Image: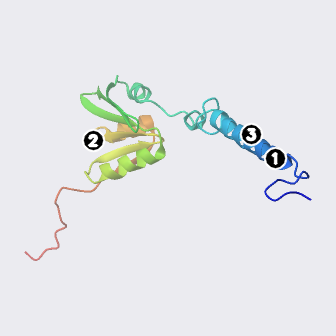
Amino acid sequence: MTAPGTVPASTGTGRPVLRWVLLFVLLLLGVLELLFGAGGLIGSSQAAQRPDRESVEELSRRIGCTAEITADAADLRQGLCTSGGEEIWIATFPTARAQDAWTTEAKAYGGSYLVGEGWVVVLSDTTQDLLHGLLGGVVVSGTDHDGGHPHTGGG
């Protein structure tokens, strides 16, 4: 019989050892995730797993001009070049989400845009067919701000 307040001799060190083993395993799993998980310090990042996207410089070369980089931010890289007397604005985006946000916002200002995977080129009436032929992509039109309304007659 044991005295009140004392631990019985039959309680071994099994539970504390189990707790330490579990704690060590969880710690080890956390370290492995930090090192090798998605975006980890050693594992390949999500950016490295994305298919290569064309750069502003590559797109301008395909157009036949040399781009001057005008912005280099986390969510957008843009450049401006001149071809055939026309200024051509080119932007590249690191994610589809950044590109979609920019394109949605730009449409409100009107104009036409050539949209490819990870890039947008602002079009003019004189460059639309040429650039679409050179780069591919999809032509997207913004809101019409010309103020014109169809005339229904009557005076």
Q: From this view, report whether residue 153 is shown above or below residue 95.
A: below
Pick the front one: 44 or 10: 10
Residue for badge 3:
24
**Residue shown at the point (87%, 54%) measured from the top left:** 8
Label 3 packing within 10 angstroms: few (<14), some (14-19), many (20+): few
Q: From the viewer's perspective, is 39 left or right of 30?
A: left
127 relative to 30 in the view: left or right? left
* Residue closest to the eye, 19 or 42: 19
Report which residue position mark 2 lands on. Answer: 124
Q: Which amino acid does label 2 sit on?
A: Ser
- Residue 102: x percent and y percent? 36, 46
Mark 1, secondary structure of its residue: helix
Disc 1: which residue: 18
Q: Return the x and y of residue 2 as percentages of the image width and height.
A: 88, 57
Q: Which residue lies furthest to the bottom in this view?
A: 154
> What number is the disc on residue 89?
none
